[in-house]
Image (cartoon, rainbow, N blue to C red):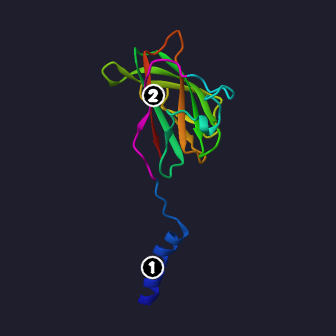
Amino acid sequence: MKKKIALILLAITIVPLLMGAYIETRTMGYIPLRTTVTADDTALDGTTASYTYQFADKSAKAVAITGEYNTAEIYFYGTDAAAETCNFKVYAYRENGPACLVCTGVVTLGTALKATGVFYGGTIAITDYWATSSVIDSGNNRAARLQFDLKGCKYVYVEIDIPAASEVASISAEISGY
């Protein structure tokens, strides 16, 4: 009887391991994606040399997400004042694949401080987005975050467009994966 109980307990412990029932979520800390951008990036347009959607034209500012991560999370922060804005596009690339537009968006600085004179992006609004994209904690004067499934992509690039009116003095973005 004791042997049967011991075998049952062993089976209850080992069988889920063999079936993959125990899942670990790998995470990475935030790393710089763009730092102190003060002028518009030249937009990817698909035809201009060095600005096509080809992998060979991938911006040197694209960040490799190393490791086995399924989801990316981006937050923004900038200088000037609360309520200043910045437009952006997020692109993702698979190894040797074309640029895929993840989303187009606008980030508005909130009142929460990252450091003296540096404000978190408190509001993010996105359009033209992958179905797996979402915005978390937007409009609450905290650090709003953009999340999206990487869909097998390894590189992420944020293209910045600082509007003429209500513009940030500079904008930065950091990315994490899990």
Element type where label 2 sits in the image? strand
* 154, 177: nearer the viewer: 154
- Residue at the spot of label 1: 10
Element type where label 1 sits in the image? helix
Q: Could you tell me which residue is drawn at 54 percent across and 34 percent down?
A: 157
Q: Could you tell me which residue is drawn at 59 percent across and 46 percent down?
A: 95
- Report the magenta residues as a range: 26-41
Q: Residues within 10 Å of mark 2 (few under 14, many from 20)?
A: many
- Residue at the spot of label 2: 76
Asked if the residue under mark 2 is in contact with the one under mark 1, i.e. CB atoms within 8 Å, the reply is no
Amino acid at circle 2: Phe
* 161, 134: nearer the viewer: 161
Q: Using the numbered discs, state the Cα–Cα distance from disc 1 to disc 2 in whole angstroms.
A: 49 Å
Amino acid at circle 1: Leu
Residue 49: quarter of image: top right
Sequence-first disc among 1 and 2: 1
Q: Residue furthest left?
A: 116
Image coordinates for residue 106, horizontal then vertical, percent: 55, 22
In the visual, does 74 lie left or right of 43?
A: left
Query: Does the magenta run of residues contain 38?
Result: yes
Image coordinates for residue 99, horizontal then vertical, percent: 63, 36
Query: Do we see residue 40 in this rendering?
Result: yes
| Up-down relation of residue 62 to residue 21 (above or below) | above
Q: Which mark is residue 135?
A: none
Image coordinates for residue 164, horizontal then vertical, percent: 53, 10
Query: Does the magenta run of residues contain 125?
Result: no
